[in-house]
Image (tube, grey):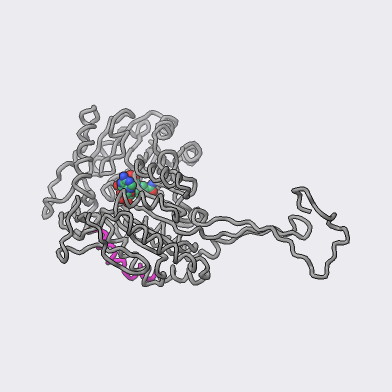
Amino acid sequence: MAAVLQPNAIPTVKLLINGVWRDSNSSDWRDIVNPATQEVLARVPMCAGGEIDEAIASAAEAFKTWKNTPIGQRARIMLKLQELIRRDMKKLAACLTAEQGKTLPDAEGDVFRGLEVVEHAASIGTLSLGEMAENVASGVDTYFIRQPIGVCVGITPFNFPAMIPLWMFPMAIVSGNTFVLKPSEQDPMTTVLLAQLAIEAGVPPGVLNIVHGGKQAVDRLCTHPAVKAVSFVGSCHVGEHVYNLASTHGKRAQCMMGAKNHAIVMPDANKDQALNALVGAAFGAAGQRCMATSVAVLVGEAANWVPDIVAKAKTLKVNAGTVVGTDVGPVISKQAKARIEGLIAKGVAEGCILDLDGRNPNVDGYPSGNFIAPTILSGVKPHHSVYKEEIFGPVLVIVSVDTLDEAIALTNANPYGNGTGIFTQSGAVARKFQNEIDVGQVGINVPIPVPVPYFSFTGSRGSKLGDLGPYGKQAVHFYTQVKTVTARWFDDAAVDGGKSGGVNTTISLK
Ligand code: NAD
């Protein structure tokens, strides 16, 4: 919702350009709303061309010196940043819960998973080593070095306002690039706090810039001639647009997108462990995780476990994220709530069984929060809307199949390939699954298999565009370009004496 700026009434979210925090001169502003209370926490500007260009210009100028800043100096800024994030963990989590809605412990988890990337970024020395081969021809050596590419851009979604920005800017800048980050306009305040900590940690002016906005800002970032790479995390339709736009304009692009994560429950699974994991992964963060389990595939006799899943889901406490003991907070906005409820209704209309209806729960003290309690639909078939669409809410759909082969075929036929999991006590079954499943992140008795930062996040099929993922070694590759050098050094006293064969007109190295 666009709102007219009323100076001094409600705080405004600032831009960071060339090391200076300042107000936008945009005439278009949007409210940031606490999803549990509807309180307007701040207003964020929807920037367009001029301010975006200024941020990019500041990053381009800063790159001239930052790219040659010694590795150790860059790494020490990351060491400092991790210390500051730890210091401010509670403050970051409180801000995150206020603007995003997830529970305070889960907000700390959001910050912590990003903090792990910052810690890993401090290893940039070993992560960015080149390679060398001596004597590739007589007296000739070849080596490659990794160099930063220039101004890089990050565009982030609402659901992880700490972790996902931290997937991006630490790896980009520690690799010697400069960065322009555009957080989600729905909850940009946590990202702003992180950027403040980055400045406090010693990131020089222009190396990290923050802009705000929506499509106009994103389109400018993806087309500006000075931008070299775009990292995007968000929905499929926006990610496809960003990938096409950025690629057409000659930029590297990586887009991590939507999901419909299937958890396969085998009848030999440890039932209690498997169902606890399933219910936590389906309803934690109100289902607003790209790695949430949104489809349970019950194989064979496990189809009889629907009542047990419903019973566990019923035990989860729905409340504001600040209330101790809450399991499921509100969804991000009234629009998201209406969309999710609409999909539940569509599922019922299309013939799915509504085993647990979480619409309009009574939440004491928070009558206007965007709450939906855990909802379960079974008897779901691949043609049902609740199966085909990413619901991104606390809704678990259950499909029953007879065999593991059917479960694998079903998962592989789904357009998305972000995450999946299998619950079984059989190593042979798990190994077959790991081998045959076409999904980026696979969990074996692990419900949300988000890799730690020494690996990289990935994705398959409709969930990812671009071949390199965020964080880990793949991010170093994304944010650097390889230069190979082939060198021959002559001893000053050396004379050819015909040894080299004189003038070489062939492509062979001699
Ligand atoms: P979104 O696509 O609506 O927004 C993402 C970013 O794109 C935001 O910064 C937003 O301002 C911008 N944007 C929105 N509309 C745009 C447009 N028309 N043109 C250009 N830019 C636009 O996503 P969201 O709702 O904030 O986040 C939820 C989605 O993100 C879900 O689909 C979820 O699966 C996905 N996600 C994926 C991953 C992953 O790693 N694969 C991680 C987290 C979230």
Figure check: 18 above or below 109: below
- Is residue 493 at least partly visible in the picture? yes
Residue sitting nearer the eye, 246 or 387: 246
The C terminus - image quarter = bottom right
Residue at point 55%, 63% (across, down): 126
Query: Total of numbered circles in the picture?
Result: 0
Q: Residue furthest front?
A: 50
Q: Dividing the picture into quarters, in which one does residue 34 lie?
A: bottom left
Figure check: 445 above or below 140: above
Q: Is residue 388 left or right of residue 243?
A: left
Residue 213 drawn at (x, y percent): 29, 54
85 in magenta: yes
- Is residue 277 at least partly visible in the picture? no
Q: Is residue 152 left or right of residue 501?
A: left
Residue at point 51%, 70% (across, down): 69
Residue 389 drawn at (x, y percent): 31, 36
Q: Dividing the picture into quarters, in which one does residue 385 lie?
A: top left
Main secondary-structure element of the magenta-colored stretch:
helix
Residue sitting nearer the eye, 31 or 201: 31
Residue 483 drawn at (x, y percent): 60, 57
Residue at point 23%, 27% (across, down): 351
Residue 469 drawn at (x, y percent): 46, 50
Residue sitting nearer the eye, 269 or 148: 148
428 in magenta: no
Segment colored magenta: 81-97
